Image: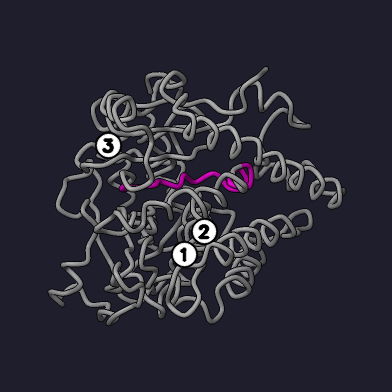
Amino acid sequence: MSSAIELRAGPRAIAHIREHGLRPQDIDIIPGAAGGPKGLGLAKLDEWLFADFLPQGFSKRKNPTQLIGASIGAWRFAAVCRGMIDGKFSAEETRKALALFAQTYCETRYGLNVSAAAITDSARRMIDLLFDGQVANVLAHPHYRLNVLAVRGKGILAREQRGRTHAGYALAALANAVGRKHLRHFLDRTWFYSAYETSLSTGVSGQKWPASTANSSVLNMQPFFASLELDPFQTEYAALTEKNFRDVLIASGSIPLVLEGVMGIDGASEGTYWDGGIIDYHLHLPYAHTEGIVLYPHFTNKIVPGWLDKMLPWRKAKGASLDNVVLVCPSAEYLQQLPMKKLPDRNDFKRFANDYEGRLKYWRFAIDESARLRDELARLIESGDIVGRLKPI
């Protein structure tokens, strides 16, 4: 019988699971990669993880689980954090929010030669549909803490302008090919974090801190990573608030030249913001500095640092930073059984440009099939057989 999932893990994670199993209370961080419609291929797995599995450990955790996402990963996790009723976690609402996100994304429709402005307007309408009246809940979730990554242009990319932006990203791609560290001359990372104080014991949200980095309370709410030097990129930390939430989500998914860059984000430095995946495509962060497990539901069995590294096969994450990571992804056998032998992707908008119903059918099938990923992972965790399935990351 073929397996639907592949499991890879770092040495510390393997040792921990051999001794304790994979327990929800041990999971400190969940990364969410950029990748557009590929996120739909994890839909049923997401529902189970966030509505059923992780909540089993809520009462045993002192701190919220950090959800760190770029682009589609940020949108998925924002939907997760919408799963609240009267300031308290609701499994049913979590499943509904994730299902609504998947449905809304699936039903997005573009014509041929659509403009960046039109795609951006469509994305903003999607955000309004998904989160209108819900942003306070998203930011004040008592058990999940939302973190959204975006990039801010500098130099030639400091402002968006036809021709200038094309040239800027062409130069950035060349610099990145020479060495990833050279991309820092074109882009900085901005890490937006939920600046609400919450109580795990009551599930009731507390005070919303002002979105001012001069405020000591906001500084105390910054992610653990704020105390670390992540990599060669300059990283600014800014509070994620009701006022800037929509702009931040749009910016995190604003693929250059496909969507418009976002300017004037409240509480963040002046500049033009784009897709967080340009720097943090698969989120190669110094995870090993955290004590717990990093559970990574992913589209593929490798971690590619930046979006511009996709065509550089030697550019993939490795080393001690992944020691406590458990990566869960669809197996090669699983992908071969999908209609197009792959997860949904952004090229499907062009591939099915004249067949909207065909794309819808294909994407919905991929969503339904992801229940196989969910069922196999749940079975392996419950039985303890997960230990024998772990391969080195």
Task: Count residues near mark 2 (Cα–Cα under 10 Å), then give few for <14, some for 14-19, many for 20+.
Answer: many
Residue at (41% x, 78% y) in the render: 242
The amino acid type of the residue labelled 3 equals Lys
- Say what amino acid the circle numbered 1 marks: Cys
In this orientation, which residue lies closer to the viewer: 263 or 170?
263
Q: In this image, 48 relative to 143: left or right?
A: right
Dot placed on the residue nearer the N-terminal end, 1 or 3: 1
For the residue pair 89 and 124, the one nearer the viewer reads as 89
Mark toward the start of the polypeptide (2 vs 1): 2
Disc 1 is placed on an element classified as loop
Residue 181 is tagged as: 3
Q: Which residue is mark 1?
A: 81
Instruction: Name the residue located 40 percent from the left edge and 20 percent from the top edge.
Output: 314
Residue 98 within the segment the image draws in magenta: no
Q: Which mark is residue 216?
A: none
Q: CA distance from mark 2 to mark 3?
A: 27 Å
Mark 1 against mark 3, which lies toward the viewer? 1
| Residue denoted by label 2 | 75
**Measured Cα–Cα span from mark 2 to mark 1:** 10 Å
Magenta extent: 28-41
Amino acid type, mark 2: Trp
**In this view, the mark in front (2 or 1):** 1
Viewport quadrant of the C terminus: top left
* Quadrant where the N terminus is found in the figure: top right
10 Å crowding of disc 3: few (<14), some (14-19), many (20+): few
Q: Position of residue 370 (x, y in %)?
A: 65, 40
Question: Residue placed at 63% from the left, 70% from the top?
Answer: 121
Residue furthest to the front: 383
Disc 2, SS: helix
- Report how far apart the C-alphas of labels 1 and 3 lie in the structure: 33 Å
